[in-house]
Image: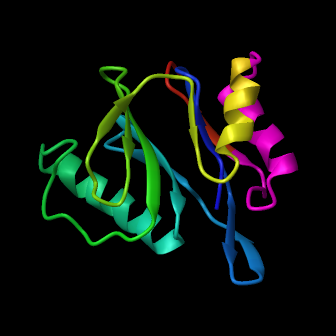
Amino acid sequence: MTTVAWDGKTLAADRQVTYGNQRFEIKKLFVIGDGKLLMAGAGTADDLKLFASWLEDSFADNELLFGGETPEIDDLQAIVINTQTGESYLYGEKLVPIEIKAPFAIGSGGDFAMAAMKLGKSAKEAVELASEIDIFSGFGVDYVDVNK
């Protein structure tokens, strides 16, 4: 699946996708609306990209968080950060935003990342650590610092 971590300052995600018996690298962290939203997610690659496009369209239409016609999504967990307000949300398949507080992690390596952040590691470090343990996470880490 993947590992995504949010520590209140940094959103981080690994790059591995597993399809059958194959692993390959994709981008799972998206900067939306000129950096006003950050999103990283776990699930199928097509659902992740579909969700990112929906968020982009919703943001462009000023329908932030509940925008536009809802796409059909089957397998998704995503963390969305509003960099203007500092609010963070968890989304699932029904695309209903649930407000969350940092630290927070999702995906198959999420428990490992949560433990790392509880022990003082950053989100980036937490994803790196989880990627060493979780066979469904890897290929490096993408991250965005909210304050930069």
123 drawn magenta: yes
Indicate whether 56 appears above or below 20: above
65 drawn magenta: no
Q: Residue at x 65, y 43 (%)?
A: 110
Residue 115, image x and y in percent?
Answer: 73, 28
Q: Residue at x 74, y 33 (%)?
A: 126
Residue 70, image x and y in percent?
Answer: 19, 64
Viewer-proximal residue among 94 and 18 = 94
Left or right? Give the position of 19 relative to 41.
right
Residue 13, image x and y in percent?
Answer: 63, 46
Residue 98, image x and y in percent?
Answer: 32, 37
Indicate whether 99 appears above or below 26: above
Left or right? Give the position of 27 relative to 48.
right
Indicate whether 79 appears above or below 95: above
Please tell me in which quadrant of the rendered image residue 105 appears: top right
Q: Residue at x 12, y 43 (%)?
A: 62
- Please provide the residue range marked out in magenta: 119-141
Q: Residue at x 50, y 18 (%)?
A: 147
Count of numbered circles in the view: 0
Please tell me in which quadrant of the rendered image residue 87 appears: top left
Viewer-proximal residue among 112 and 83 = 112
Indicate whether 88 appears above or below 41: above
Please tell me in which quadrant of the rendered image residue 128 appears: top right
Q: What colour-coding does the image apply? A: rainbow
Position of the N terminus, as image quadrant, is bottom right
